[in-house]
Amino acid sequence: MGQAKPSASGIPAGRPCALGRLHPAVALGFFAAAIAMTILVQGPLFSAVALGAAAALYRSLRGRGAWRLIAAMAPLMALLTLVNPLFNTAGDTVLLTWLGHPYTLEALAAGLQTAAMFAAVLLWFASFNRVLTADKLTYLFGGAAPALSLVLTMTLRLVPTYQRKAAQIATARAGVGKAPRGNGLRAGLRHGTQLLSALGTWATEGAVTTADSMASRGYGCGPRTRYGRYPMGRGEGAVAVALVVLGTAALAAILAGGASAQFFPQVALAPLTPLRALGLVALAGFLGLPALLDAWEEVAWRCSTSRI
Amino acid sequence: MALLDIEDLTFVYPGAARPALDRVSLHVEAGSFLCLCGLSGSGKTTLLRHLKGTLAPHGQRSGRVLLEGRPLEEVSAVEQARRIGFVMQDPTDQIVADRMDHELAFGLENLGCDPRTMAQRVAETAAWLGLEPWLHWPTNALSGGQKQRMNLAAALALQPALLVLDEPASALDPLAAADFLTTVRKANRELGMTVLLAEHRLEEAYAEADQVVALEAGRIVAAGTPREAARSLRRAGSGLVRSLPAPLRIYQGVEQGDAGCASAGDDPAVTAGPLLPPLTVGEGRRWLCSYAQSHAVARRAFPDEPPAPSPEAIVLRAQDLWLRYERDGTDVLRGASLAVPHGAVLALMGGNGAGKSTLLRALCGLERPYRGRIEALGRPLRAWKGQSLFHGGVALLPQDPRELFVEDTVAAELEEMLAGPRDGEGASATPFPPTERLAEAAALCGLDGLLDRHPFDLSCGEQQRVALAKVLLLDPQVLLLDEPTRGLDALRKDELAALLGHLVARGVTVVMASHDTEFCAQHATQVALLFDGAIAAIGAPRRFFSESLFYAPAASRMSRGTLPNAITPQEVVALCRGSDAE
């Protein structure tokens, strides 16, 4: 229930952030490149940088609340790592034999690599949701596909609305002794089905009203225009340029093979060639810049408040 | 030429036996404020929806709707969208965008407005309505009152000629509702906005309107200025009289009496009295003072209610409750203590966000205080295992009764409640076989004709009766009600009161959170004020309301100084007429 109330800090969902101040197109480009690079890079150092940067950005966007999601990545990664050798039996170092299949160290290492990539991508998406709010997405795609972007906005708004409604219905029903009884699967399933059917009725009712409200304000009458202004100052311009330069360098180094790694038949750590070093620095710079700017701002803010 | 003319509009829904609108004609001049009143189901919404081509219901229709002399069918959709603003009842479902500024811009975007004009319109609308602090907020995070102000702003941003509002305040609590109506009135007075407002709760809207039109079963039964309309309603013996503002009802009761219907038009007090019939509490005070000088008024004090019963009869006891929702948040309850005696009807009053709903939920274990003790029916809350508390013990009826509905028919909703507790659970044994209990609850709540209907297709009052019937099938000894009168018209409130009276007579104890001072003054046996997370005052309603100014019903505010401690319109009327009727 309490989540509905915005915290004392003002706007519920928005901490000031460097990425959020950039033009939505730049932010979109950043996330597209960051996710692509995270998927492309291999090797412990590169993956660690990607995962670290993803976690750092999410932390700077969410504040203390970020730790819950970040901490949840650990068991997920452990699971993915441990499961990988069950399906991938390549590799020379056999740790144990499982139903006649070898369980190898190399597959374990490759699993960890995949798990880190997976966790980092999840965190990038979590940050993406925070920065590219529905209004920005609508702004970006509103020109090309107005109907689509509106549907997107409305869908994004409905998810939290229904979550809250579901919680309200569950509470209301608990108040007449209809809380899910016991932990049994059947009880849980029955409770869930009822909740879903009730939510469905709400959704239909609500959708009719929403459609009326849209029609009465002229939706579908003719060509739409877009609301929203995202002017970029010189500082924002500089950040955008830095992102483009660092991103291009990192991508070039990665595509030139600077971030490849070998797991099979044996794990071989590649030597730190100039190309790899350049790739690593550029990647760290690119992925880490938004979080770094936020941290810098935080420090500057602390300094300036200490003088008040 | 009026801004809006409705000429002989008759409308029949497909398959309906009688018309939903029957030869309705009305004229709205530019700049006027017209209040369309009527009980639930009288055809208000059907009429308003005919004012907008895209919203008009399907059915058989005759008559014309003219906007500035042009039939509405000839006015283009774009022009209709721009010139007629529409605000509906549900604050949440009307919202399209995820942020307030985008919601305000939505209509402008649809009409192809250029970005510069759009920014200006959004800015000036938000500033005028005082919405700036929330401009960048997600719409989900706003309160009901804020949402409805935003919906009003979204309509005003298009700079319409006519603003149509369909019961916009009925889902809001009285404070937010009054605030909303004040804003509408301001738009009418300061911006010259023509307003057509449908309402069944007339306390605020009625006195504000320039013109009142009353609908009953799709027909106009009274029209004119608020005073004229009130007189015609009285003369016609309409049920709407019960909904009029308390000062008017008292005036009518005193000046015209029960037999006054026939001769009201000739009554010298009406036609030539020194003061006009009062619409507001202030006018009511002046009128009552002058009436008391010229008439024999019984200035007798009503006795206080009997003192609280002995402590053994306490069915629900909360001691020193502290509760917060977020670790770093503020406390919602700060040492709240409450003892509810058996057979009481305790009204829990307090401002928005004072924690009334939270306290109710805590009393039945749905919220967990981090400090404090709660005892229900003599046992600590922890001792009630599983769902046992809710079977024959305590039950909570939520603010929105629809939250309880999961089935497709009313009958299925009731049957669902008969799946009783497991062996050993429950505070009392089931008194009757299931089918008899179901029939009894349905009859008690007046659901006989509704059993095959879908619960979401029912009216607000009917939905609440279904929810109450569901709760009663649990055979509760303590009934917790969260804002039971919200959205109900005067007639439905009387029905609810009768039902509660019946339950209390059967030994049920009622605790209700409410903003409705008049309902509480008439039906509560105890009133508690929740403030700053604790019970700031508690007492019998007569003492509580006659000592309070801000939480007093209109009748009490109007009569204090003249009459000692009358708190209901009936009491004021009885004293003024000098009769000894209680």
Image (cartoon, rainbow, N blue to C red):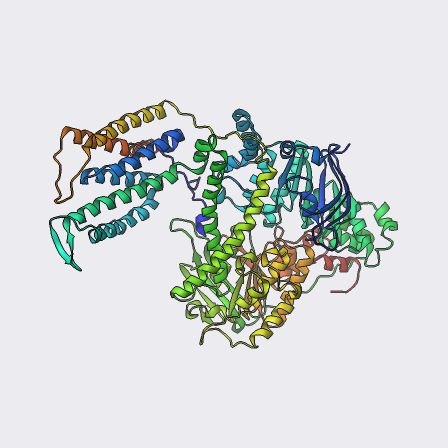
Q: Is residue B564 visible?
A: no
Give the quarter of the figure containing the C terminus of chain A: top left
Q: Within the image, what quadrant is residue B568 found in?
A: bottom right
**Image label count:** 0
Q: Which residue is found at the position 75% from the left and 39% from the top?
A: B64
Indicate whether A36 appears above or below B514. above
Looking at the image, the residue that sits furthest to the top is A234
Position in image of residue B529 (x %, y %): 55, 56
Position in image of residue A31 (x %, y %): 33, 35
Position in image of residue B296 (x %, y %): 81, 57
Looking at the image, the residue that sits furthest to the front is A100
Q: In this view, does B308 lie to the left or right of B284?
A: left
Q: Which of A227 and A90 is in front in this view?
A: A90
Q: Nearer the viewer, residue A265 or B19?
A: A265
Q: Which residue is found at the position 77% from the left and 52% from the top?
A: B251
Q: Can residue B73 be seen in this view?
A: yes
Q: Within the image, what quadrant is residue A297 found in?
A: top left
Position in image of residue A298 (x %, y %): 32, 34
Q: Is residue A284 left or right of residue B471?
A: left
Indicate whether B273 appears above or below B187. below
